[in-house]
Image (tube, helix red, strand yellow):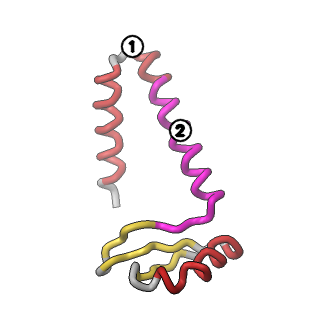
Amino acid sequence: MEKTVSSQDVPQLFGDLLRQVSDKGDRYVVERDGVPLAAVVPFALYSQWKRRRAGFFQQMRETAERANLSEDEAIRLTDEAKRAVRSQP
């Protein structure tokens, strides 16, 4: 379950917040003035994101090699893909 917590409340709630993340798998978005600043998530989920990210970039490198792209061309295409994905609702 994802919950939101104010950055002002985090110091008082941090121990409980960590227990809920660790024990229940809860996720927290830390906000300041309604603007998201950070996320507190279970470490297993964070590790999964890191592995997927590394796999994505490895796949991009392999694709660039097969397509015979320069590093600059591959970076440009990667940036274009990221912008396209991030612009989707």
Q: Amino acid at mark 1?
A: Asn
Quadrant containing the N terminus is bottom right
Residue placed furthest toward the front: 11
Quadrant containing the C terminus is bottom left
Contact, CB < 8 Å: mark 1 with mark 2? no
Left or right: residue 77 versus residue 9 is left
Q: Residue under label 2, please give it.
A: 54
Name the spot of residue 64 as percent of width and height, x first: 42, 21
Name the spot of residue 85 as percent of width and height, x first: 36, 49
Does 69 appear above or below 78?
above
Look at discs 1 and 2 and give the one toward the viewer.
2
The label on residue 68 is: 1
The label on residue 80 is: none
Does 49 appear above or below 71?
below
Q: Residues within 10 Å of mark 2 (few under 14, many from 20)?
A: few
Left or right: residue 73 versus residue 46 is left
Q: Amino acid at mark 2?
A: Ala
* Secondary structure predominantly adopted by residues drawn in magenta: helix
Whichever of labels 1 and 2 marks the residue nearer the N terminus, that label is: 2
Q: Is residue 27 magenta?
A: no
At 33% from the left and 30% from the top, the residue drawn is 75
Left or right: residue 63 versus residue 15 is left
Distance from Cα at disc 1 to Cα at disc 2 = 21 Å
Q: Residues within 10 Å of mark 1 (few under 14, many from 20)?
A: few
State the extent of the magenta-drawn residues as a range. Answer: 39-61
Q: In this orientation, which residue lies closer to the viewer: 14 or 56?
A: 14
Q: Secondary structure at mark 2?
A: helix
Does 31 appear above or below 12?
above
Residue placed furthest toward the top: 68
At 30% from the left and 46% from the top, the residue drawn is 83
Q: Quadrant of residue 14?
A: bottom right
